[in-house]
Image (cartoon, rainbow, N blue to C red):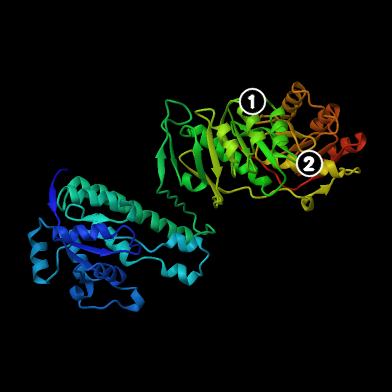
Amino acid sequence: MSRSKKASSALISVFHKDGLEPIVRKFQELGITIYSTGGTEKFIKDLGIDVIPVEDVTSYPSILGGRVKTLHPKVFGGILNRQDNASDVAQLKEYEIPQLDIVIVDLYPFEKTVASGASEQDIIEKIDIGGISLIRAAAKNYKDVICVSSMEDYAEFLEIISKNEGATTLGDRKKFAAKSFNVSSHYDSAIFNYFNKNHHIAALKVSETQGKVLRYGENPHQKGFFFGDFDAMFSQLHGKELSYNNLLDVDAAVNLILEFKNEAPTFAILKHNNACGLAQRETLHQAYIDALAGDPVSAFGGVLISNQKIDKDTAEEIHELFCEVVIAPGYVEDALEILKGKKNRIILVQNEVGMPEMQVRTCLNGILLQEKDHKTDTVSDLTNATHSKPSERELEDLLFASKICKHTKSNTIVLAKNKQLCASGTGQTSRVDALNQAIHKANSFNFDLKGAVMASDAFFPFPDCVEIADKAGITSVIQPGGSIKDQLSIDYCNQNGISMVMTGTRHFKH
């Protein structure tokens, strides 16, 4: 893999000119002939550096509004010829085709154009044809050509040619070919996903070009990786590198707190992807205290998240707890200094970024794909199933509990009172077990369940759950309904003065 090859010529045609100047000046210093097109050609000329227009090679101007510039045999012949093939070399000479040793090309910003909300016509015009073809050709012929397909690789490329006076090894060229096919495959996936956004074609293209190797996976004997732009979503202000399990908990925390965006101060504490404490209060300080009261035992080593900037008083309370991660939209300076008092505590600022619309997970020998559960139960969704109706306070608590229930592993029951999570039963095989777990937990932390409400992620097939809840002091219930035996639960509630509302929407989370 050490076969070295010194370059004598280069084709440069890029959309983004940032970082290009040092490379062009190095080419001039090394005596490398430069060919270029359009705006790139002008950029190089303005630097006072000699450049040969591609039109001088092809004898064709840029046509069709710039759609066709480099699509010509004299360009692609210069890239695809095999320099150890006598016939190829002879044909280059016969047709006066210049050998091209370096190709520096990037692509029109298709994804950014889509994200900007541009018109369909503008989006279509950002589907690169010549650039993608040049990249594929140069990467295919890596034995003779080095392809630089992204401005992110400029520094590495410049270091190589500077150190080796314009020469590259076969290993260099193959590495850059892999980078190039990463760029081209991601680009094509983005275009396909734009055309197939409604999934009319049952095909899945997932492409992430940014990633990191994690210390390990779920357990130390498993490898782990994260693919995505973590730095766009979070600014990490302190602490160690996030682990695989940290990332799962952070994901659960972020999705849960989104339910309370732009609401009163809300604080949540999560452990193993489930909320073990959550409260909404007039101040963030009180919201944290009441969230912690929900389960101060499980909170140890948990992930904490707030929907508002963390103040000094709240930070002082948090500092007393051993926790892995703290997430907030921001921190006052005094609060941040307090939280930094624990060396390994991970402190994150959550930025406003778009979230994926779809959820992807492996299954058997394939992949499952589904839309995210974007449905949040509101007052307008509720149907009164019983003679008695929930009070205004109960109604607020029912919707509060429903939001938590939606983000808790099934089977789940959530008990809440005065916009505070009293307890939940999580991930149980029986809904009765989930309810009993929640009641036992609430009682163990001295919650008075009289007047509390109950939320269930799915319907009650029998009246046993409402009976158990009634005896624990629960006075109002929210559930999706839909069982052929709904009436049994409704009858029990009517006979015992419990109000029940139905949402019509199940919120399983497996």
Q: Give the class, few, some or many, for how many residues have Cα within 10 Å of label 2's Cα (few <14, many ≥20).
A: many
Q: Position of residue 419 (x, y in %)?
A: 77, 38
Q: Position of residue 155 (x, y in %)?
A: 28, 50
Q: Quadrant of the N terminus?
A: top left
What residue would you read off at disc 1?
Answer: 298
Q: Position of residue 235 (x, y in %)?
A: 50, 43
Q: Is residue 349 above or below residue 33?
A: above
Residue 366 seen from this side: yes
Residue at 15 percent across and 61 percent down: it is 32
Q: Quadrant of the C terminus?
A: top right
The residue lying furthest to the front in this view is 334
Q: Position of residue 109 (x, y in %)?
A: 41, 62
Q: Secondary structure at mark 1?
A: loop
Q: Give the class, few, some or many, for how many residues have Cα within 10 Å of label 1's Cα (few <14, many ≥20).
A: some
Residue 361 seen from this side: no
Q: Is residue 436 above or below residue 211?
A: above
What residue would you read off at disc 2?
Answer: 398
Q: Between disc 2 and disc 1, whose residue precedes?
A: 1
Q: CA distance from mark 2 to mark 1?
A: 24 Å
Name the front one of labels 2 and 1.
1
Residue at 79 percent across and 45 percent down: it is 502
Which is more toward the observer, 205 or 454?
A: 454
Query: Where on the picture, by quarter, is residue 328?
Result: top right
What residue type is disc 2 on? Leu
What residue type is disc 1 on? Ser
Residue at 60 percent across and 36 percent down: it is 335
